Amino acid sequence: MSPIEINKHKNITLQPYNSSGKCSGFNRGPLGDLYAYLDVQEVPGIQRDGINLLSTVSISYLDAILGSVVKVKTMEGVTDLQIPPRTQPGDVLVLARKGAPKLNKPSIRGDHLFTIKVNIPNRISAKERELLEELSSLSNTNGSHSRTRPRTQPATANVRIDRGIEVVKKHAC
């Protein structure tokens, strides 16, 4: 018998095997072979590694230092992920048994592993800088090594016009 290609979508319920290891055909018809071709859609942000799932989650540097709870996407929907205090970039946090089920043993599931990415801001306010410098000075008094931070000075600029092009040279005071 040659395969027949049908481009229809139909929901069917497959009967589990009985105690003899056999089952009857569809609507109690004769036994036969069913060939099903499945298109498995990828979920953006989730990769599969066997029965484990892998994702990356970005957190702020404050969440990494202090700890927090963030919402993450899993195969079952959105759930909470506990970020412990002092989390480092590259740390891997695990949601146990939130991975893919094992083939032929759906009671066994993999884990969902989240690699932590810590976002460092490009710009901070004057108040944030003041607080971070105060925090840094507190850290230095507790025996950590001394850090020298360059003080940013307002830049001055010399401007000249060279063949109709504005040339700007900046230098610190």
Image (cartoon, grey):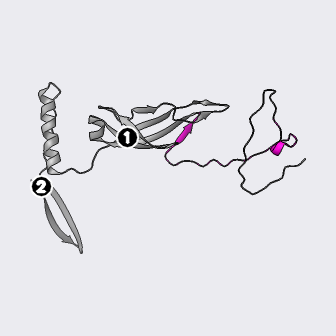
The magenta stretch is: 23-50
Q: Residue furthest left?
A: 173
Q: CA distance from mark 1 to mark 2?
A: 33 Å
Asked whether residue 123 is drawn in magenta, I would say no
Q: Note whether residue 150 is visible.
A: no
> Which label belongs to residue 117?
1
Q: Looking at the picture, which amino acid does disc 2 mark?
A: Pro
Q: Is residue 5 above or below residue 21?
A: below
Q: What is the crowding at mark 1: few (fewer than 14 residues within 10 Å), some, or many (at least 20)?
A: some
SS for tag 1? strand
Q: Circle 2 is placed at which residue position?
A: 154
Does residue 78 appear left or right of residue 134 in this picture?
right
Residue at (81, 35) in percent of width and height: 23
Residue at (55, 31) in percent of width and height: 110
Compare residues 164 and 39 and report the one nearer the observer.
39
Q: Looking at the picture, which amino acid does disc 1 mark?
A: Lys
Does residue 81 appear left or right of residue 131 in this picture?
right
Q: Nearer the viewer, mark 1 or mark 2?
A: 1
Asked whether residue 31 is drawn in magenta, I would say yes
Q: Residue furthest top?
A: 143
Q: Position of residue 97 (x, y in %)?
A: 52, 31
> Which label belongs to residue 60?
none
